[in-house]
């Protein structure tokens, strides 16, 4: 008997906006001028927040902080495709998602000073706390999708993680379960190509991360993660699929971590300045500015104004954060359980 | 009132709570059509359907992780891990996440899940099917750890666990599943979490035990004036009841089937030393398994604490 081909697969890559600001008119999402500016302002806010956070850490006013610089398109583009009914499961490097969805900047800063009160998501947002244990938020997001489906809830679940997460068991277990039950979940990998010092080729022998979805029976797509239109479009389509009961989608946003892994890291130890310079030219904000300028929506003065407004907003948040009273000892106890055990109750009272 | 074994009692608790509260869903391996490898969930798939009795892939970390997401989004999941030795695959989800979600989110999210798993030795099963690693989980402050000792407490504790607003690890002593039959009332009743039970009153020595060792401890004390306390909840444990008894008898023997070093008996002994040492007439003794990996069937009798070992410890503390 001759061998036969049982299945064959293709992996698509979506890009809409190139480095020079030229967009494919066929694929460009139908966004109004106001919406385009909103995308831009959200990216500038994310960048500004990030720059301030790094500076604050250097001054000893913030703890260890993981910069998002370079990943603004992946974060803002996906977040703006969400509706209030949707749920977000972040890792720990999605401050651009939080800011775009309206999570208070003061709370983000508070969290990164080491004040966990910053993790209390406002009631109107469905954002899970930061997840420091890489990939472990993925099965939890799958469970949330189970719950939404079970309750006939119109929302979908979006879970964020990095390229390093794709090597973890929870990535595979979560993907597998989501595929088996065709759950309303969108998996978004910000493939920033570095897991601390390990480059992508040290993480996987696969040509793309997107193709990993194929093994679990659902679609994976790679998008240019520095192209906010591609991220937005792919996320929106994936969410529509999820809501229609078609099942999960995996979106690999190919981007680049322009800064260090965290403020405690020195990326110059393991990667070349040439590589960083190459990606600096692919800056997601730069290309959107070029696009907006070409449409006469935008000039240099607007860019300066946008940055200044974002700077003022972040400065106000920094001021508000630093004016907060320090957490008291009882803070450790007060929300850990609905009711403390007798020993914990005594410990809370200092006994 | 019906005489039920522990399997039937747990099944009844699940069925009644699922009928009462549509948020209760079960997930795990082989729990649906097959009714679970111990038949604990028998008939529930037929009665409540595939959306509420979910046969999952073989995927312990995702079972626990998904239960967390379900719990945070309004369901009341009961995850079954087929044997305690396989909870290690889901350990991170349970300890790093389920136990911390309420604290991490400063109360915005909670995690009312129950993780049921067969626990303990003496059933002639393969490796990792007879673990008793409860102490590992008792070091996780946001997680309640519950161990029933018979059909009545199994049902009442499970109902209480299902209604608890925080995560509960529910350890079902496999050796007792079909060994004991007790009167188990139909309909709802609860056994309060965090409360120990006086299993036998006495005045000369206090025996502390839980799970399948309770049965063995009760056999061992037949001819002694011993008070036997069934802990039922290990985290948080009922120090008040334990200390009250110890202050009365002045002698303590702790019996557990897990390895001795850093077993839960160490916590009990330390608490007794801190709070009641001046009431003691004798050293606190622990009758526990040796510090070796849980063996297979041919060595299990050498591993599990025996009635004779418990009696030897009783004789020793009574010499003082």
Image (cartoon, rainbow, N blue to C red):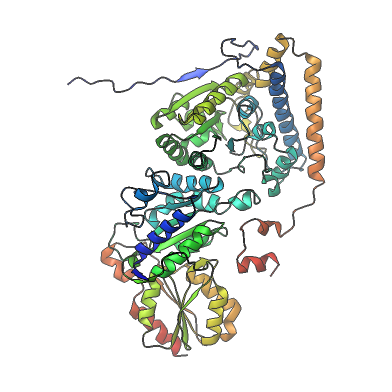
Residue B144: x %, y % from top left: 53, 61
Q: Which picture quadrant has residue B310? A: bottom left
A294 versus B10 height, above or below: above
Residue A33: x %, y % from top left: 71, 16
| Between B45 and B233, the one nearer to me in the picture | B45
Q: Can the viewer see residue A154?
A: yes
B259 versus A128 height, above or below: below
The quarter of the picture where the C terminus of chain A appears is bottom right
| Between A284 and B234, the one nearer to me in the picture | B234
Q: Which residue shows up at 58% across the image and 23% down it?
A: A231
Question: Across the whole image, how many numbered discs are drawn on residues?
Answer: 0
A74 versus A60 height, above or below: above
Q: Give the residue furthest to the left.
A: A1
Q: Which picture quadrant has residue A161? A: top right
Residue A211: x %, y % from top left: 43, 26
Q: Which residue shows up at 68% across the image and 42% down it?
A: A64
Residue A318: x %, y % from top left: 79, 39
Q: Which picture quadrant has residue A317? A: top right
Q: Give the residue furthest to the bottom.
A: B319
Q: Which residue shows up at 47% across the image and 88% down it?
A: B204
Residue B24 shown left or right of residue B257 in the figure: right
Residue B241 shown left or right of residue B226 in the figure: right
The quarter of the picture where the N terminus of chain A appears is top left
Q: Which residue shows up at 52% across the image and 59% down it?
A: B163
């Amino acid at each position: 008997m001759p061998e036969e081909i049982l299945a064959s697969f293709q992996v698509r890559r979506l890009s809409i906006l190139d480095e020079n600001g030229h967009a494919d008119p066929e694929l460009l999402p139908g966004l109004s001028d106001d919406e385009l500016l909103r995308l831009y302002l959200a990216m500038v806010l994310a960048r500004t927040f990030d720059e301030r956070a790094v500076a604050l850490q250097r001054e000893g006013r913030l703890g260890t902080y993981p910069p998002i610089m370079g990943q603004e398109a992946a974060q803002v583009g996906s977040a703006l495709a969400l509706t209030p009914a949707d749920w977000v499961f972040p890792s720990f490097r999605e401050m651009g998602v939080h800011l775009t969805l309206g999570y208070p900047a003061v709370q983000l800063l508070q969290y990164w000073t080491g004040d966990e009160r910053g993790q209390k998501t406002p009631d109107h947002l469905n954002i899970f706390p930061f997840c420091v244990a890489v990939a472990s938020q993925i099965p939890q997001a799958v469970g949330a999708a189970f719950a939404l489906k079970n309750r006939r809830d119109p929302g979908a679940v979006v879970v964020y993680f990095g390229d390093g997460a794709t090597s973890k068991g929870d990535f595979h277990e979560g993907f597998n379960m989501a595929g088996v039950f065709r759950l309303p979940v969108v998996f978004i990998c910000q493939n920033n190509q570095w897991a601390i010092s390990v480059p992508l080729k040290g993480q996987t022998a696969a040509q793309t991360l997107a193709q990993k979805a194929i093994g679990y029976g659902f679609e994976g797509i790679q998008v240019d993660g520095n192209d906010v239109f591609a991220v937005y479009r792919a996320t929106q389509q994936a969410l529509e699929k999820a809501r229609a009961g078609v099942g999960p989608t995996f979106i690999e946003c190919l981007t680049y971590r322009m800064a260090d892994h965290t403020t405690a890291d020195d990326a110059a130890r393991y990667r070349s300045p040439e590589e960083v310079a190459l990606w600096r030219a692919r800056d997601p904000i730069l290309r959107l500015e070029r696009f907006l300028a070409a449409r006469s929506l935008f000039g240099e003065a607007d860019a300066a104004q946008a940055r200044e407004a974002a700077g003022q907003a972040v400065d106000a948040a920094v001021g508000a954060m630093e004016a907060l009273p320090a957490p008291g000892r009882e803070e450790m106890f007060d929300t850990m359980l609905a009711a403390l055990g007798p020993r914990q109750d005594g410990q809370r009272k200092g006994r | 009132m019906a005489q039920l074994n522990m399997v039937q009692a747990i099944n009844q608790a699940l069925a009644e709570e699922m009928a009462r509260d549509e948020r209760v869903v079960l997930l795990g391996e082989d729990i649906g059509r097959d009714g679970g490898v111990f038949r604990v969930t028998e008939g529930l798939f037929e009665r409540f359907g595939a959306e509420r009795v979910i046969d999952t892939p073989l995927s312990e970390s995702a079972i626990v992780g998904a239960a967390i997401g379900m719990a945070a989004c309004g369901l009341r999941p009961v995850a079954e891990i087929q044997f305690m030795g396989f909870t290690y695959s889901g350990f991170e989800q349970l300890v790093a996440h389920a136990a911390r979600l309420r604290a991490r989110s400063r109360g915005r999210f909670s995690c009312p899940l129950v993780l049921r798993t067969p626990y303990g030795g003496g059933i002639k099963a393969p490796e990792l099917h007879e673990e008793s690693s409860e102490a590992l989980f008792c070091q996780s402050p946001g997680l309640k750890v519950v161990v029933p000792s018979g059909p009545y407490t199994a049902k009442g504790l499970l109902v209480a666990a299902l209604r608890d607003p925080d995560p509960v690890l529910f350890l079902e002593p496999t050796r007792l599943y079909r060994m004991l039959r007790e009167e188990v009332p139909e309909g709802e009743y609860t056994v309060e979490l965090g409360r120990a039970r006086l299993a036998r009153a006495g005045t000369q020595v206090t025996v502390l035990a839980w799970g399948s060792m309770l049965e063995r401890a009760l056999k061992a004390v037949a001819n002694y004036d011993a008070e036997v306390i069934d802990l039922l909840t290990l985290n948080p444990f009922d120090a008040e009841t334990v200390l009250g008894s110890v202050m009365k008898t002045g002698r303590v023997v702790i019996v557990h089937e897990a390895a001795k070093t850093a077993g839960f008996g160490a916590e009990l002994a330390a608490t007794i030393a801190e709070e009641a040492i001046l009431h003691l007439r004798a050293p606190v003794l622990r009758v526990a398994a040796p510090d070796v990996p849980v063996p297979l069937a041919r060595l299990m009798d050498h591993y599990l604490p025996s009635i004779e070992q418990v009696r030897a410890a009783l004789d020793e503390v009574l010499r003082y």
